[in-house]
Image: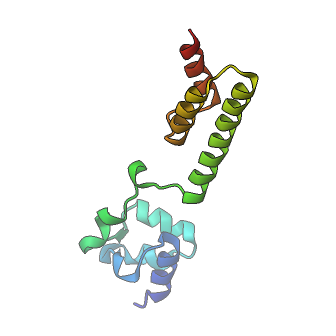
């Protein structure tokens, strides 16, 4: 009995390789009558058609390829752009305070070095720090 058409239909329906599909010899008459994909799915549920498990190491997830949260790296340009934007904003604020006479030259130098070292997360964080200096 030639079941090659049924095998190819099962391959398309179940999306598995030819070697993984097994027809039960006792239920070949039912399999021969199957003509649609839904018939094949019903036969799989009735256990007339079996799908073998994948052999070997393919089913084991390759650990080297896995990418967890700690492995994800941002593009350098994005980090650099964010840094430049933040630093310019903070330096501009410090320069404005210096121009108004609220900061001395030593304080400005100290603040600029801290801005360079990314001590402050944002302009608001810098404002809080300066408010603490003045008290």
Specify the quadrant of the image occupied by residue 7.
Answer: bottom left
Reply above or below: 45 against 31: above
Residue located at (51% from left, 74% from top): 34
* Colouring used for the render: rainbow
Left or right of 75 in this view: 32: left
For image coordinates 37% across by 65% down, the residue present is 65
Q: Name the quarter where the C terminus is drawn.
A: top right
Point 42% across, 65% down: residue: 44
Pick the quarter of the image with the N terminus. bottom left
Q: Nearer the viewer, residue 28 or 97?
A: 97
Quadrant in the rendering for residue 52: bottom left
Residue 62 appearing in the image: no
Between 10 and 59, which is closer to the camera in this rendering? 59
Q: Is residue 83 left or right of residue 3?
A: right
Location of residue 111 with respect to 52 vertically, above or below: above
Q: Is residue 48 above or below residue 25?
A: above
List x then y, in percent, for residue 24: 32, 74
* Residue found farthest to the top: 135
| Count of all numbered marks drawn on residues in the image | 0
In the image: residue 24, left or right of residue 91: left
Q: Position of residue 6 (x, y in %)?
A: 48, 81
Task: Say which of 56 and 5 sits in front.
Answer: 56
Query: Where does the image place residue 64, in percent across and percent down from the top left?
Result: 32, 65
**Residue depicted at 70% across the width and 31% down the height:** 93
**Residue nearer the viewer, 47 or 82:** 82
Residue found at the very far left of the displayed protein: 56
Q: Quadrant of residue 38?
A: bottom right
Is residue 83 in view?
yes
């Amino acid at each position: 009995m030639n079941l090659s058409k049924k095998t190819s239909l099962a391959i398309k329906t179940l999306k598995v390789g030819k070697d993984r599909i097994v027809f039960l010899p006792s239920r070949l008459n039912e399999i021969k009558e199957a003509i649609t994909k839904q018939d094949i799915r019903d036969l799989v549920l009735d256990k007339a058609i079996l799908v073998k498990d994948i052999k070997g190491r393919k089913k084991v997830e390759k650990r080297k390829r896995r990418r967890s949260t700690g492995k994800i790296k941002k593009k350098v340009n994005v980090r650099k752009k964010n840094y430049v934007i933040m630093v310019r904003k903070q330096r501009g604020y410090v320069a404005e305070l210096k121009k108004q006479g609220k900061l001395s030259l030593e304080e400005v130098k100290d603040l600029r070095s801290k801005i360079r070292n990314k001590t402050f997360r944002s302009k608001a964080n810098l404002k809080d720090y300066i408010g603490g200096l003045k008290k």
